């Protein structure tokens, strides 16, 4: 589903964030991306949803070289990729319902369909009763659950989460991980960049370690490597 071939990313300021990165992720996998701060994890995530383009090399998702996508095809790509951030990025003056419905509204989904999808997404993350609340009335963990609902409302084949538990306490982090696992069990490929050693070590999923913009380790049922933090 994801194929990264010889990808290098040099930012305009000259920083080489990724240096000849190669990796493959199969459909339906659950993958952790770990590595020290500055390793290039977020840059990799940004390349996956085309917030950045590679300086050289190829990022292919479901057979499409997304570095080559024209502007007109970007909305279509983004509908197929759910994204979750550390800092939620919710619209604070809009209700939970509207936050989750936003992406559907843009593509002109009918009201009935939208209602159905928003309800089932909120159900999945256990926030059915919070549709009318504002993000600021929710705890951090609840806000991140709204982000998960927002990310899956289009039933994307791929979900990307960059440090989704970065602002959460351990118990709430587990809740988010449990939901990501549930989403994965529904068939969505899940890629999670994280610093959370406790989570990674307990989940025993595939762990890709990045350092200096390169893949340095690929473990099938891995742990957060000793010496990498
Ligand atoms: N927009 C940017 N412009 C310039 N340099 C950047 C930008 N984003 C990230 N970097 C640099 O690229 C390197 C990798 O960053 P990042 O991908 O955020 O790593 P990580 O998420 O693993 O901490 C770092 O040296 C960082 O300072
Ligand atoms: Mg990062």
Image (tube, helix red, strand yellow):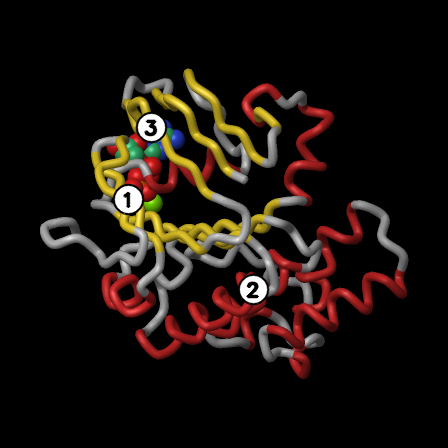
What's the CA distance linking mark 3 and mark 2?
27 Å
How many callouts does the rendering have? 3
What mark, if any, has residue 218 been given in the picture? 1
Question: What SS does tag 3 mark?
Answer: strand
Foreground tag (2 vs 1): 1
Q: Residue at x 71, y 37 (%)?
A: 76
The image quarter in which residue 140 lies = bottom left
Query: What residue is at 26 percent from the left and 39 percent from the top?
Result: 210
- Of all residues, the one furthest to the bottom in this rendering is 129
Q: Residue at x 31, y 63 (%)?
A: 204
Q: Quadrant of residue 102?
A: bottom right
Instruction: Identify the residue under disc 3.
Output: 21
Disc ID at residue 198: none
Q: Is residue 209 above or below residue 170?
A: above
Query: Sequence order check: which comes first, mark 3 or mark 2?
Result: 3
Per the image, the residue denoted by label 2 is 183
Secondary structure beneath disc 1? Answer: strand
Between the C-alphas of marks 1 and 3, the distance is: 12 Å
Left-right relation of 85 to 188? left
Circle 3 packing at 10 Å, graded few (<14), some (14-19), many (20+), is many
Point out residue 91 in the picture as x, y percentages from the top left corner. Answer: 61, 58
Q: Earlier in the sequence, mark 2 or mark 1?
A: 2
Q: Secondary structure at mark 2?
A: helix
Q: In the rendered structure, are the residues bearing label 1 and label 3 in contact, judged by CB atoms less than 8 Å apart?
A: no
Badges 3 and 2: C-beta atoms under 8 Å apart? no
Please state the horizontal and vertical placement of residue 53, each as a whole percent of the image.
Answer: 49, 24
Nearer-N-terminus badge (1/3)? 3
How far from the left and from the top, in percent, is residue 4? 43, 30
* Residue 151 appears left or right of 23: right
Q: Position of residue 111 (x, y in %)?
A: 89, 62
Kindly tell me whether residue 79 is visible in this rendering.
yes
């Amino acid at each position: 589903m994801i194929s990264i071939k010889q990808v290098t990313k040099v930012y305009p300021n000259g920083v080489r964030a990724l240096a000849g990165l190669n990796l493959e992720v199969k459909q339906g996998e659950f993958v952790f991306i770990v590595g020290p701060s500055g390793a290039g994890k977020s840059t990799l995530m940004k390349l996956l949803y085309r917030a950045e383009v590679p300086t050289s090399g190829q990022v292919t998702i479901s057979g499409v070289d997304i570095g080559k996508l024209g502007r007109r095809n970007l909305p279509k790509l983004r509908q197929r990729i759910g994204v979750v951030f550390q800092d939620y990025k919710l619209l604070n003056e809009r209700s939970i319902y509207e936050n989750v419905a936003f992406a559907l509204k843009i593509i002109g989904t009918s009201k009935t369909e939208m209602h159905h999808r928003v309800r089932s997404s909120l159900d999945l993350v256990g926030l059915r009763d919070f549709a009318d609340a504002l993000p600021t009335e929710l705890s951090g963990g609840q806000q991140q659950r709204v982000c998960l609902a927002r990310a899956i409302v289009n039933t994307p084949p791929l979900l990307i989460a960059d440090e989704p538990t970065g602002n959460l306490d351990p118990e709430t982090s587990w809740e988010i991980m449990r939901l990501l696992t549930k989403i994965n069990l529904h068939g969505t490929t899940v890629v999670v960049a994280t610093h959370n050693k406790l989570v990674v070590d307990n989940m025993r999923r595939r762990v890709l370690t990045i350092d200096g913009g390169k893949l340095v380790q690929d473990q099938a049922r891995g742990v957060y490597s000793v010496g990498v933090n």
